Image (spheres, rainbow, N blue to C red):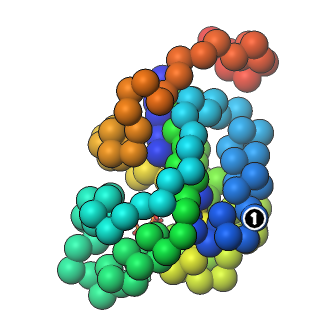
Amino acid sequence: MEKTLVIVKPDGVQRGLTGDVLRRLEAKGLKMVGMKMIWIDKELASRHYAIHTGKAFFAGLIDYITSSPVVVAVFEGRAAVQMVRNLAGATDPLAAAPGTIRGDFGLEIGRNIIHGSDSPENAATEIALFFRDEELYEWPRDTERWISEG
Ligand SMILES: Nc1ncnc2c1ncn2[C@@H]1O[C@H](COP(=O)(O)OP(=O)(O)OP(=O)(O)O)[C@@H](O)[C@H]1O
Ligand SMILES: [Mg+2]
């Protein structure tokens, strides 16, 4: 089953939106298989956002993501990567549709509340960056047959 990494970014945690963000992903039917609060350091931030090294917004992005604790989670489900991207909305809240997390809760691209992996391959890399194997659970969900056709 596909997995994706979600980060409730520092602004999401500071603004008390952690529950709202996770609730939307849970309500969609995605299954949470790991979750914790961490304070990302510069090294981890630089590895996670390595693809953006050298861009004009890189320094600001690293400052932002390391500025305060975040909540990281792994969600699992059918097409989990794209499902989370759909619920998160466009990177810039100005372009994010109402009804999406960024569309409903954000104003600025540099304060856009949530991270979601952008491909299954990157999801696997990112999950390994943030979670040890024993922090992820394979648990049977009693509502599964009401969510998945199986
Ligand atoms: N032009 C920009 N100006 C300022 N910040 C930006 C800009 N582009 C991206 N960012 C920041 O860098 C993050 C990573 O950019 P990316 O292109 O990977 O967008 P994303 O995949 O929608 O977001 P994320 O990777 O955080 O889920 C964005 O979420 C945003 O916070
Ligand atoms: Mg991205």
Q: Residue at point 56% right, 29% down?
A: 33
Q: Residue at point 32% right, 68% down?
A: 42
Q: Residue at point 69% right, 16% down?
A: 141
Q: Is residue 115 left or right of residue 144?
A: left
Which is nearer the eye, 121 or 36? 36
- Give the residue furthest to the bottom: 56
Q: Is residue 20 visible?
A: yes
Q: Is residue 35 left or right of residue 122?
A: right
Q: Is residue 49 visible?
A: no
Secondary element at tag 1 = loop
Q: Residue at point 49% right, 74% down?
A: 67
**Image coordinates for residue 80, horizontal then vertical, percent:** 53, 38
Look at label 1 and name its amino acid: Gly
Identify whether 6 is placed above or below 63: above
**Image coordinates for residue 36, horizontal then vertical, percent:** 56, 44
**Image coordinates for residue 59, horizontal then vertical, percent:** 33, 83
Looking at the rendering, which quadrant does residue 77 occupy?
A: top right
| Residue where numbered disc 1 is placed | 16
Looking at the rendering, which quadrant does residue 149 occupy?
A: top right
Identify whether 113 is placed above or below 128: below
